[in-house]
Image (cartoon, coloured by chain):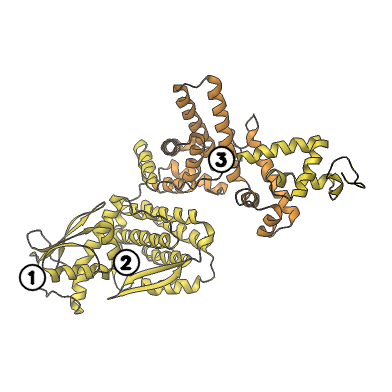
Amino acid sequence: MATPAPPRWDRKMQQRLARGEEAALGELYDRYASLVHSLAHRVLDDDEAANHITREVFGFLWENPDAYDPRRGSLRSWIAALTQRRAVQRLRHAENRGRSSQDEIEAKVREANTAARADFIVTSMPAPLRDALELAYFRRRDYRQTAADLGVTEDEARRRLRLGLQLLSTAMAPAAPAGLDGWQR
Amino acid sequence: MTAGTTGPGPDRGRLPPYDHSTLKSLLGAWALAACSREESLAVEVHLTDCASCADEALRLRDAVGLLHQEETLDLDPLLRSRVLSGCLDRRPARIPVPEWAGPYDAESARLDALLRDLGDGYWDAPVELRWYEDKRVAREVSVAQVIGHLCAVDGLVASALGLPIDELPFDPAQRTESYWATARNVPGAPLRARWREQSQTLVRTVSFAGHGTAGLDVGYGAFTLPLRDAFLDRAFECWIHAWDIAEAVDYPYDPPAPRNLNRMIDLAARMLPTAIAGRRRAGLTASPARLTAAGSPGRSVHLEVEGQGGGNWYIALDSPGAPATAEEAVAHVALDSVEFCQLAAGHLEPERIAVGQDGDRDVIRDVLFAAASLSRL
């Protein structure tokens, strides 16, 4: 998953896009395409639809490089927010044409928003926390084994697991957590 | 309950004493079912008494439900060119990437994505590099060394563009050996970053420099290539070595997009007359040369490359300078596009390759061997 770039990289990228540099567009894609595609896929659960959102997001940024303001946050979280917005719009649109009731649609949209926020949080959290969660959840290691695998104390392993889940739980907040719908760093 | 046990619950008496802060610190591990049975039990008992921990425990349990196995959804490699060309339709680039640098841009991005998918656990995995020097040659190196090799030889292009590079020999093989020697202790991740940064710099530099640079000479030691062809050569090497890596770690890797593949085949086809002449001088050919008057067409071979990226080429047999025409064709050879590339990369032996042939067999043999001789470390 894309690692956050330093703020200087974001500013420089925006200037290069504004200048119309094709090579910059390629670099932007290489850094963020997997983030955009996986978030869109998480919301829409469809590969073709996620491809479509990927085209839309990069097309929008290439056409409107000034829509991003580097002073207000990182390019990465801005792109994630844009992706989530576009994907949820598409989901709502598709559901509206189906036979779901308004309540069902809203529930689905809420769930998709939470899932996308959770994915973004996981990919954005400090690597030590993510690594601990990865070991404990996906590899089914207990916290003592996790501590040994990471070369940290058992106290530290417990701390990382708890903190990681606390961060993740902010995805469920009814109001948008910092850094997501608003796009502060 | 046996006599002598104290405490209200059946198990409570046997639990070691956990204080509030320890129990609280266990909440994450508990929610993930990553603590001992005893600890779980202690937490659960505590939750019935402590509202603040119970509240947090519930939240963390729900958070676990949001964890989600990141599907190994590798991006469709063809999506990149679709997305980029869609963007360029909406707003044309003011500083475009020269067309001849496109395949290198695409292939280096594809290899970088492969390395990202593989992660840092594979740098020492063994990879067999193969090429052809009158016979099959193979050498086992690591994934990191393959990237070092690409970085070292890409440096020749950087040098031609006046970019600062390491002072190493110009011959690609010697250059690679020196690079491996100096970068022996560089871990894979920074090596990848170095290679990727250089490849992005190359694309950016030629974009700004524009088409005027297309004809600049790039020195490879024993020969030179014009910059536009050197970029194709590097794209080809990047694909072939990415394929080597993918094969070594049992990962799928597709051929380049047909348009890019076609340009790479075209470069190999254009290099064939010189390769044939060189082999003839060295006494390695089966068919004799015929003298042709300067400017008049000599004999040719019709090379038909089938499949995606394929096409038809006429290869001059008697002199690299002579124009090659369909009228003078003395033989026709047909083979698959990816197999032709494997031949030119030294991955398939000329004796073993499946070809359709028609006409002078000796001439066809010379063309196939010359194609294999294009390969190098």
Residue identified by numbered label 2: B347
Between label 2 and label 1, give the one nearer the viewer. 2
Task: Say what amino acid the circle numbered 2 marks.
Answer: His
Tell me the subunit letter for badge 1. B
Helix, strand or loop at label 1? It is loop
The residue labelled by disc 3 is A77
Q: CA distance from mark 2 to mark 1?
A: 34 Å
Which quadrant holds the N terminus of chain B? top right
Label number found at residue B292: 1
- Chain in yellow, by letter, is B
Judge the density around disc 3: few (<14), some (14-19), many (≥20) Cα neighbours within 10 Å: many
The chain letter corresponding to orange is: A
Of the two numbered discs 2 and 1 on the same chain, state the one appearing first in sequence.
1
* Residue at position x 81%, y 36% in the image: B48
Query: Residue lying farthest bottom?
Result: B283
**Residue B281, picture quadrant:** bottom left
Which of the 4 quarters of the picture holds residue B273?
bottom left
Of the residues tagged 2 and 3, which is closer to the observer? 2
* Chain holding disc 2: B
